[in-house]
Image (cartoon, rainbow, N blue to C red):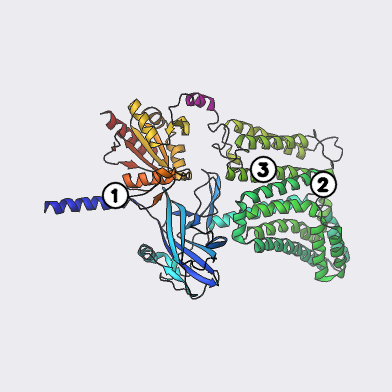
Amino acid sequence: MKKILVILITFLAFANVNAQILDPVKWTTKIEKTSDNTYLLTFDGVIEKDWHLYSQFTPDGGPLALEVVFKNPKGNFNLVGKAKESKTKTAYNDIFEVNETYFQRKAQIQQIVHVTNPKLTKLEAELNYQVCKEVCINLEKKFTFTIPTTSTAVVAVPKEAAAAVAVETDTIKEDSLAPSLGASNIVVATPEKEVVAESKSDTQRGLWSIFFIAFLSGFAALLTPCVFPMIPMTVSFFTKQSKTKAKGIRNAIIYGISIIVIYVLLGFLVTWIFGADALNALSTNVWFNIIFFVLLVVFAASFLGAFEIMLPNSWANKVDSQADRGGIIGILFMALALAIVSFSCTGPIVGTLLVEAASKGGIAPIIGMFGFSLALALPFMLFAMFPGWLHSLPKSGGWLNTVKVVLGFLELALAFKFLSNADLVLQLHLLEREVFLAIWIAIFGTLAFYLFGKITLPHDSPLTHISVGRLMLGLLALTFTVYMIPGLWGAPLKIISAFPPTLEYSESPKGLGGSAISVASAILPEGAKSGPHGIVVFDDYEKGLAYAKTVNKPIMLDFTGYACVNCRKMENNVWSDAMILPILNNEVVLISLYVDDKRDLPKNEQFVSKTTGSEIETIGDKWTDFMISKYKTNTQPLYVLTDLEGNNLNKEKPTISYVSVEEYGTWLKAGVSNFKK
């Protein structure tokens, strides 16, 4: 009886510990033959409430993006395009300073493959991904697809996935997870239900921001030399050529609507040609960021007066001849003529808007073009309704070119954001934070000098004095320039935090006070480095343990990740506290083990985990397996205080995770106190 009781207690304890191994996403898969040698692979995931699964298109520098990896494709099969995803959400992450893209409650990944080896019977795939709530988990899931010989799909339904779907019955509705890519005769073994669609509030906010930016850009385009003089000319044409005032107003309204239709059609064509998902993928691609940089520099040079970007004159002549036809068709061609004739001023603005909207994906280019064209069309309609307003318009003059030049400076500044994106992805460190800010300081400083009349450009009129408006704008540019200067020494610059690289991606990651830290780093122990807030930290367990034995201090294991947002929050908000920082600096040896370190282990150090059966091939795999096998959990951040033999110092709460300063401090002090006893 006693032996049975011991076995039972041991079993319950083991079960309780293993309950900490979290797996918030349950997957089912299917494969379907869509044509000769071509197959559609589908991964359907049900995500537990409040967890986020990050998309393939989450940009570098943020959380860990999902990755679909196929084993041995060479000579066996080819991937047709990039894997498609179901709907995602996008939200700004103020820790990583990027727009992260993620799934909530459900996810679907679809990949088309073309099999080239007729003897191939199975396809092996792996999903590498990160899910986060209060903690983050990096997971690898392996799948094997048996290639079907008919057009009927072969569906794999793990028991855990079926159970997960059943649990969700209170919050599900009848529907398919996402449109199939030409699927037919699919045999699905899971209930035909899905989690209720996620809230669209973040997406809507993103589209509203695009609309308002585009709307303001449309007004800016109005104040350029190519467009502004055409307002009185066009309105006078409608009022004089129309037999009645009502007809003139009607024609002007049709003219304005025609402008909107032309630009919205442009946004629709961009979305249709590239695809809504592809636009977002392009926005995170290195080469397209470089192309966007070059385009914006060209646009900026055009606005600054180096040359004019113009469509062929023959286009304008042909369209203008059609405008004489009269009626609605003639008015439509008049609107098209405006778009062509004003292209040298509106083209760079429209191009920039389409580039920026592309980074949002979906219908953002259409929304952007609608906002831009609405602002462009409104004055023509309003002045036709109230011709007396024309007398209140300022006269054309050199100020129009000033507006154009200011837009050129803004285009040039924005261009370096795209170059910075490419540099961050490639980790070349050519455009680090200090260099980026130096370029922006030079651009906006030069803009201030230009507005003060100290610099003139090719198309500027002689300037005898500056207006009050120009003076105010110059002071604003100068103020912004001065504001950025402290950023060269580590000031956070919260107003523009989404534009320059983060503080960590710089020549002096520690910013102000970095000189004091550099002195400390000169006497760092072997194998250690200067970590957050100047804390001495090891990233290798053996080296940290050896050092702890020499100084006779307890060890704090920090299981973390480069892409773990809550790890950064703990470091920024908890470790920096006046109660915590002295303990981490003086009373423990900190060892940070990165579970998402993708560097390969030497071949002789690679092994198969006895706990999970997974192949341990990278440094991150090694620390993940260490965490799971020893502490029976797979979440980050995870903190453990141990003595020099690896025994836990906090008996009641051996590990701790994402908690408040007070709870963390109490736990830390208790562990240190136990070590000293």
**Residue identified by numbered label 3:** 416
Q: Dot 2 surroundings within 10 Å: few (below 14), some, or many (20 or more)?
A: few
Q: Is 169 in front, or is 542?
A: 542
Residue 386, horizontal then vertical, whole percent: 80, 59
- Residue at 87% x, 38% y: name it: 462
Q: Name the kind of residue labelled 2 in the image.
A: Phe
Q: Name the kind of residue labelled 3 in the image.
A: Phe
Q: Which is more N-terminal, label 1 or label 3?
A: 1
- Tell me: 111 left or right of 391: left
**Residue identified by numbered label 2:** 307
Q: Is residue 288 above or below residue 448?
A: below
**Residue identified by numbered label 1:** 17
Q: In whole angstroms, how far apart are the C-alphas of marks 2 and 3? A: 21 Å
Q: Are marks 3 and 1 in contact (CB under 8 Å)?
A: no
Q: Which is more N-terminal, label 3 or label 2?
A: 2
Q: Quadrant of the N terminus?
A: bottom left
Q: Which is more N-terminal, label 2 or label 1?
A: 1
Residue bounds of the magenta highlight: 508-526
- Residue at 79% x, 61% y: name it: 385
Q: Is 206 in front, or is 229?
A: 206
Q: In whole angstroms, how far apart are the C-alphas of marks 3 and 1? A: 50 Å
- Tell me: 183 left or right of 190: right
Q: Is 146 in front, or is 117?
A: 117
Q: Dot 1 surroundings within 10 Å: few (below 14), some, or many (20 or more)?
A: few
